[in-house]
């Protein structure tokens, strides 16, 4: 059957195509991997649990019994005899059936020969050994007591094991009998229940659907948050630069305007000051040159230097710069940045609103069910053998129940008989042990002859009671051992051993071994090229039904699990997700005009050093205030009162001149100095910063849509990858559920394995261990009789006297007959 490409390969190809469409590597740290989904198993409840015998202390005993049976029956499975029994039972001769009973019979024969050998005279070597033992320094009674103790100890161990194994067989029979109809019932719906379970599997596609639909509710906000997160450092830095530049622009324009205003006032004050200085200089020059003016020469030289120092007509004009900056700043940069910041922070909500329609379409795509899942259960092929399979199993199940009840009933009888015989053997062992101990106790009390006779007589009688019980129960015990040995031994050697080795499967698969009416491959509906053994091996490995059974049509599970088209539709709809960030202006048109005006104003090209040259010069070269004080002092030294008065008036005039003209001019110069220095420090870098900010704003506004689109594409891939993870989980679960639990033929191999475990491990092993332990007890029963009869003569007073009157040689090698003595 040609198999379509597997779903993992198709989905891998889809993922590869998605990754090749994007040039950048996908970083999905914001979304994370898909979480683990929990699916509800849909396989039938009557699933075959493997039956395995738990390890226990009897495992060594079971192994010993199996080795014993393998030694008794080393021959392989009797293929010819089984073929004849199945095809032509009348042609099978009785002597051929003797082969089935030969192993138990041979074992019993060997055992009886061993027992009989114990009654034969010892070989010379044996006689010498026995004589050697008799020469040792312990009494002969102790030697026989030691042998009797060893035999009874082995017998006691055998009785305990017999009790345990007999009870174990009884305990295993009930559960094993109940497991047969349960196994048959679980196999009846092996194929017929598959479509319903496939439908239940297909319905659980709703689990990944619900999870994806839940994720779709927040995908737009998530993508918007991711875009905001990845852009915020750049956008916040840009907005901070604009805010700082706007503040610097405002400060620079204010200084420039102050500079221009101050400069105009300085020009006007300089003209008035020049006239006043010239008038004061001429009037003082005439006054100080009077002949009557005493000590006026030095003051006259200073008056001659009385003239203006700074000439602000030499500084450059700033009218053109002010003209370019007229109306600047037009924009309120603080409000503008705050507004743009609010717009950018609302990006997740904006993305959610913009993607709402696409998310609705995505939900419609996700809510659909792939075509393969719709038909996965409907097109599961019919099985021609389903009806006869179900009918045959139902018939076997109904017919097996009465037999199983009979088996349990007979098992109860067997258990009672086993308990009775084990109790009888235990009673024999107890009688032997009590009699032996009483007899030894009597022999040890030699100083009290009366005690010796009473205890010895009691010990001898108890030993003889044990002998009587041995004779009474030996026959039923041997009969039970032989019958259970015949059944359990043949089950182990002919069935269990060949079942475990695979000889039974080879026998069934060989043409001609089974009757034509028992065509098992046809009854089971196996494929023509698959044997029973091969079907068992494949089913044990977990092969699906369509690989083993002869279904009407081919069935390709991967074809129905193919969701590539479903994923392609989802991926196509995801491509429709868009986020428009054009509403984020960053810089308003008014703010842009302000910066452009500042950029082209020439503020940085003003020759500020000319200002500093004039500012460093004094307003008047001669200190007017000192000159007024000097004139005041000079007036007091004059002899001419008229000249004195005139000098005093000039001194007062200079003082007024300083206060009204010179001092205000100096204040204007200081003000001009502040503005000029501020502009000289900030204007050159401000224009460069303005150019850089304008370039970055322009570039960022152009890049923001493309950048947001790349982030959106990346997040869409990450989202698709994560959501595909849920569908991957579903597909993997369906594949495992269908091939390993629903449409798997593993119950067939499981039923065979359970059958072998029930028959061989749970029933045959305890059964065989039970007769083995009973045989153990039986084996020590006959030596126990001999030892009890021989030992009892030492405990009875009459025997003691008879034995003391005989010679030592006769006492050593003659075993007296019990029947010739009177108790």
Image (cartoon, rainbow, N blue to C red):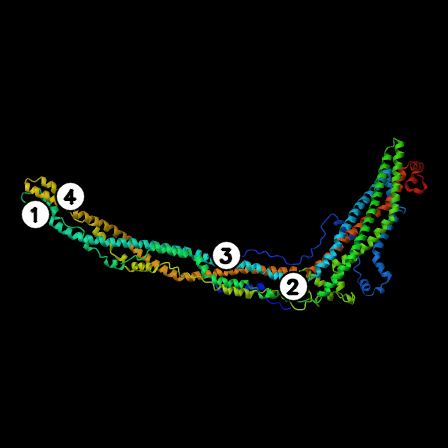
User: Where is residue 154 shown, x and y percent of the image?
Assistant: 81, 44
Q: Position of residue 67 (x, y in %)?
A: 78, 53
Q: Residue at x 10, y 44 (%)?
A: 649
- Percent of width and height locating residue 643: 6, 43
Mark found first going from the N terminus, 4 or 3: 3
Q: Do the residues under discs 2 and 1 have CB atoms within 8 angstroms?
A: no
Relative to 290, residue 566 above or below: below
Location of mark 3 (residue) = 31
Residue at screen point 66% across, 67% down: 381
Residues marked 1 and 4 touching at CB (< 8 Å): no
Query: Could you tell me how far apart the alpha carbons at marks 4 and 3 are, in whole angstroms?
Result: 83 Å
Question: In front: mark 4 or mark 2?
Answer: 2
**Pointer 4 with pointer 3, Cβ within 8 A:** no
Q: Earlier in the sequence, mark 2 or mark 1?
A: 2
> Which residue is drawn at the image coordinates 57% and 55% (left, top)?
36
Of marks 4 and 2, which one's residue comes earlier in the chain?
2
| Comparing labels 1 and 3, the label whose residue is closer to the camera | 3
Spatial separation of the CA atoms under disc 2 and disc 3: 38 Å
State which quadrant residue 810 falls in. top right
Q: Are marks 4 and 2 in contact (CB under 8 Å)?
A: no
List the residue tagged with mark 1.
286
Between marks 4 and 3 in the image, the one whose residue lies nearer the viewer:
3
Local crowd size for mark 1, using a 10 Å CA cut-off: few (<14), some (14–19), many (≥20): few
Q: Pointers 2 and 3 in contact (CB under 8 A)?
A: no
What residue is pinned by disc 2? 195
């Amino acid at each position: 059957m040609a198999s379509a490409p597997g779903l993992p390969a198709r989905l891998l190809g889809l993922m590869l195509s998605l990754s090749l469409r994007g040039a950048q590597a996908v970083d999905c740290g914001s979304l994370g991997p898909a979480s683990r989904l929990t699916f509800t198993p849909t396989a039938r409840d009557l699933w075959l649990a493997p039956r395995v015998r738990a390890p226990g202390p009897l495992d060594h005993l079971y192994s010993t019994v199996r080795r014993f049976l393998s030694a008794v029956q080393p021959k392989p499975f009797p293929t010819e005899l089984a073929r004849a029994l199945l095809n032509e039972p009348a042609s099978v001769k009785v002597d051929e059936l003797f082969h089935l009973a030969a192993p138990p019979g041979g074992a019993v024969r060997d055992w009886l020969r061993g027992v009989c050998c114990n009654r034969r005279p010892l070989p010379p070597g044996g006689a010498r050994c026995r004589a050697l033992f008799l020469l040792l320094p312990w009494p002969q009674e102790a030697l026989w007591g030691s042998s009797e103790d060893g035999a009874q100890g082995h017998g006691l161990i055998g009785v305990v094991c017999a009790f345990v194994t007999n009870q174990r067989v009884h305990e295993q029979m009930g559960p094993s009998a109940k497991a047969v109809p349960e196994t048959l019932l679980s196999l009846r719906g092996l194929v017929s229940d598959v479509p319903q379970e496939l439908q239940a599997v297909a319905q659980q596609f709703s689990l990944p659907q619900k999870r994806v639909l839940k994720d779709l509710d927040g995908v737009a906000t998530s993508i918007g948050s991711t875009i905001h997160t990845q852009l915020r450092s750049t956008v916040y830095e840009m907005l901070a630069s604009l805010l700082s530049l706007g503040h610097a622009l405002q400060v620079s324009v204010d200084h420039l305007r102050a500079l221009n205003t101050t400069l105009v006032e300085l020009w006007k004050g300089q003209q008035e000051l020049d006239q006043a200085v010239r008038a004061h200089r001429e009037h003082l020059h005439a006054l100080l040159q009077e002949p009557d003016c005493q000590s006026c020469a030095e003051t006259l030289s200073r008056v001659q230097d009385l003239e203006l120092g700074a000439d602000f007509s030499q500084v450059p004009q700033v009218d053109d710069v002010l003209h370019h900056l007229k109306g600047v700043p037009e924009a309120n940069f603080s409000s503008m940045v705050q507004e743009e910041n609010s717009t950018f922070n609302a990006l997740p909500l904006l993305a959610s609103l913009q993607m709402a329609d696409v998310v609705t379409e995505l939900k419609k795509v996700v809510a659909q069910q792939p075509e393969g899942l719709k038909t996965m259960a409907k097109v599961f092929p019919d099985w021609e053998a389903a009806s006869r399979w179900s009918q045959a199993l139902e018939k076997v199940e109904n017919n097996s129940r009465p037999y199983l009840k009979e088996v349990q009933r007979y098992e109860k009888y067997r258990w009672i008989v086993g308990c009775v015989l084990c109790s009888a053997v235990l009673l024999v062992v107890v009688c032997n042990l009590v009699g032996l101990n009483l007899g030894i106790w009597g022999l040890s009390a030699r100083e009290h002859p009366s005690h010796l006779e009473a205890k010895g007589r009691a010990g001898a009688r108890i030993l003889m009671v044990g002998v009587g019980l041995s004779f009474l129960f030996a026959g039923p015990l041997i009969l039970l051992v032989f019958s259970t040995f015949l059944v359990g031994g043949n089950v182990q050697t002919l069935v269990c051993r060949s079942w475990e080795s695979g000889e039974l499967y080879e026998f069934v698969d060989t043409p001609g071994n089974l009757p034509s009416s028992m065509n098992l491959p046809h009854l089971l509906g196996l494929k023509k090229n698959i044997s029973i053994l091969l079907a068992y091996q494949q089913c044990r490995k977990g092969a699906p039904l369509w690989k083993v059974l002869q279904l009407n049509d081919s069935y390709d599970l991967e074809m129905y699990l193919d969701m590539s088209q479903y994923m392609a539709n989802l991926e196509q709809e995801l491509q429709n997700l868009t986020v428009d960030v054009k509403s984020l202006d960053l810089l308003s048109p008014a703010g842009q005009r302000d910066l452009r005006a500042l950029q082209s104003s020439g503020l940085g090209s003003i020759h500020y050093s000319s200002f500093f040259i004039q500012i460093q010069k004094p307003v008047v070269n001669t200190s007017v205030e000192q000159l007024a004080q000097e004139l005041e002092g000079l007036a007091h030294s004059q002899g001419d009162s008229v000249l004195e008065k005139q000098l005093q008036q000039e001194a007062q005039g200079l003082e007024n001149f300083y206060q009204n003209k010179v001092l205000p001019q100096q204040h204007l110069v200081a003000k001009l100095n502040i503005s000029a220095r501020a502009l000289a420090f900030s204007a050159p870098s401000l224009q460069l910063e303005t150019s850089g900010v304008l370039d970055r704003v322009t570039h960022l506004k152009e890049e923001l849509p493309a950048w947001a689109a790349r982030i959106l594409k990346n997040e869409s891939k990450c989202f698709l990858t994560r959501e595909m993870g849920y569908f991957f989980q579903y597909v993997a679960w369906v594949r495992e559920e269908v091939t390993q639990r629903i449409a798997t033929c593993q119950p067939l191999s499981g039923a065979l394995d359970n059958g072998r475990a029930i028959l061989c491990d749970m029933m045959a092993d305890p059964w065989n261990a039970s007769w083995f332990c009973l045989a153990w007890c039986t084996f020590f029963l006959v030596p126990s009789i001999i030892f009890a009869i021989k030992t009892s003569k030492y405990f009875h007073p009459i025997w003691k006297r008879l034995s003391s009157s005989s010679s030592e040689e006769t006492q050593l090698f003659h075993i007296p007959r019990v029947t010739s003595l009177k108790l």
